Image (tube, grey):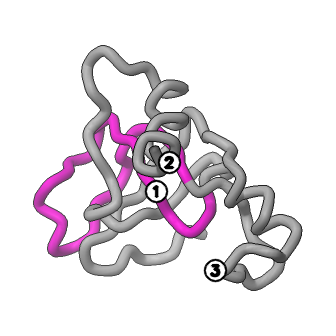
């Protein structure tokens, strides 16, 4: 069963997920943001919005987005804050969107 979305959250059908150093550190329980086990890794991902919570006027069902979250990207469906999502640029496919943000924002 799917949990209810909180205000400002979106549910995304994940089409691609990037894996980065923070994911590996999280799996080794050495990342500064510790996840409660068991958890689903995947801090950045891209996909299609399937549900939109209240107070999230920026996205609609069917939008293609890239997102960051505290995890969940390696699942078929993930929840992220709308504020942590960006519409996928028209020249990006899902794999490019899933591998862009962490590297770009780190550089």
Q: Quick one: which residue is furthest to the top in this view?
A: 91
Pointer 3: what residue?
Answer: 33
The mark nearer the N terminus, 1 or 3, is 3
Q: Quick one: which residue is furthest to the left in this view?
A: 57
- Crowding near the residue tagged with mark 2, few <14, some 14–19, many ≥20 C-alpha atoms within 10 Å: some
x and y percentages locating residue 8 in the rendered image = 25, 72
Nearer the observer, 52 or 82? 82
Asked if the residue under mark 3 is in contact with the one under mark 1, i.e. CB atoms within 8 Å, the reply is no
Quadrant containing the N terminus in the rendered view: bottom right
- Crowding near the residue tagged with mark 1, few <14, some 14–19, many ≥20 C-alpha atoms within 10 Å: many
Pointer 2: what residue?
Answer: 102
Quadrant containing the C terminus in the rendered view: top left
- Give the spatial CA distance, label 2 vs label 3: 15 Å
Give the magenta range.
44-72
Q: Could you say whether the residue bearing mark 3 is in a helix, strand or loop?
A: loop
The mark nearer the N terminus, 2 or 3, is 3
The residue at 72%/74% (across/down) is 31
The residue at 46%/56% (across/down) is 68
Nearer the observer, 70 or 76? 70
Q: Is residue 31 above or below residue 13?
A: below
Q: Is residue 40 above or below residue 44?
A: below
The mark nearer the N terminus, 2 or 1, is 1
Residue 61 belongs to magenta span: yes
Asked if the residue under mark 1 is in contact with the one under mark 2, i.e. CB atoms within 8 Å, the reply is yes
- Give the spatial CA distance, label 1 vs label 3: 14 Å
């Amino acid at each position: 069963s799917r949990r209810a979305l909180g205000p400002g959250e979106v549910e995304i059908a994940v089409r691609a997920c990037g894996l980065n150093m923070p994911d590996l550190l999280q799996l080794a329980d050495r990342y500064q943001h510790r996840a409660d086990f068991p958890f689903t890794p995947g801090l950045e991902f891209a996909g299609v919005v399937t549900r939109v919570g209240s107070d999230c006027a920026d996205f609609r069902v069917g939008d293609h987005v890239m997102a960051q979250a505290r995890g969940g990207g390696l699942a078929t469906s993930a929840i992220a804050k709308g504020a942590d999502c960006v519409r996928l640029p028209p020249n990006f496919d899902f794999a490019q969107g899933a591998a862009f943000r962490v590297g770009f924002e780190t550089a």
